[in-house]
């Protein structure tokens, strides 16, 4: 299953045209380079502000995944039974 998912992701990445990945780069670069220095500074700050939440979410998921990598996969009812809490239906 995992091998199939990796193969599908790799195939999708290889079949994606480069022009679709980098849409508008030349236009953004020309607009940013022709802007006054204050506007360029504002664009750089805007990029950082948009990057921070994304990176924090990514690091958070990575941290949780790392912490739970060896967690036991017991069902909740079985775990409660093992601790002495009997849940009878």
Image (cartoon, rainbow, N blue to C red):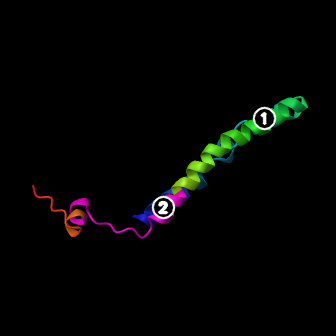
Closest to the observer: 17 or 37? 37
48 displayed left or right of 13: right
Q: Are marks 2 and 1 in contact (CB under 8 Å)?
A: no
Closest to the observer: 89 or 51? 89
Separation of disc 2 and disc 1 at Cα?
33 Å
For residue 65, which numbered disc appears in the image?
Answer: 2
Q: How many marks?
A: 2
Residue 40 location (% of width, % of height)? 84, 34
- The part of the image, by quadrant, that contains residue 82 is bottom left
Q: Quick check: is 63 in the magenta stretch?
A: yes
Q: Is residue 30 visible?
A: no
Q: Does 41 appear above or below 79? A: above
Residue 88 location (% of width, % of height)? 11, 58
Residue 51 location (% of width, % of height)? 67, 44
The residue shown at (39%, 64%) is 1
> In the image as oriented, which residue stretches furthest toward the left?
89
- The part of the image, by quadrant, that contains residue 60 is bottom right
Crowd band around label 2 with a 10 angstrom C-alpha radius: few (<14), some (14–19), many (20+)? few
Crowd band around label 1 with a 10 angstrom C-alpha radius: few (<14), some (14–19), many (20+)? some
Dot 2 or dot 1, earlier in sequence: 1
The residue shown at (42%, 70%) is 70
Q: Does 71 appear above or below 50? A: below
Q: Secondary structure at mark 1?
A: helix
Residue named by callout 1: 43
45 displayed left or right of 37: left
Q: Is residue 45 visible?
A: yes
Q: Which residues are magenta?
A: 62-79
Residue 72 location (% of width, % of height)? 34, 69
72 displayed left or right of 46: left
Q: Quadrant of the C terminus?
A: bottom left
């Amino acid at each position: 299953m995992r091998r199939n998912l990796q193969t599908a992701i790799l195939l999708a990445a290889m079949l994606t045209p480069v022009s679709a990945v980098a849409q508008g780069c030349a236009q953004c670069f020309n607009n940013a380079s022709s802007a006054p220095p204050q506007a360029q500074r504002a664009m750089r700050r805007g990029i950082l502000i948009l990057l921070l939440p994304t990176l924090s979410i990514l690091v958070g998921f990575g941290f949780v995944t790392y912490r739970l990598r060896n967690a036991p996969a017991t069902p909740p009812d079985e775990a409660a039974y093992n601790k002495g809490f009997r849940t009878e239906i």
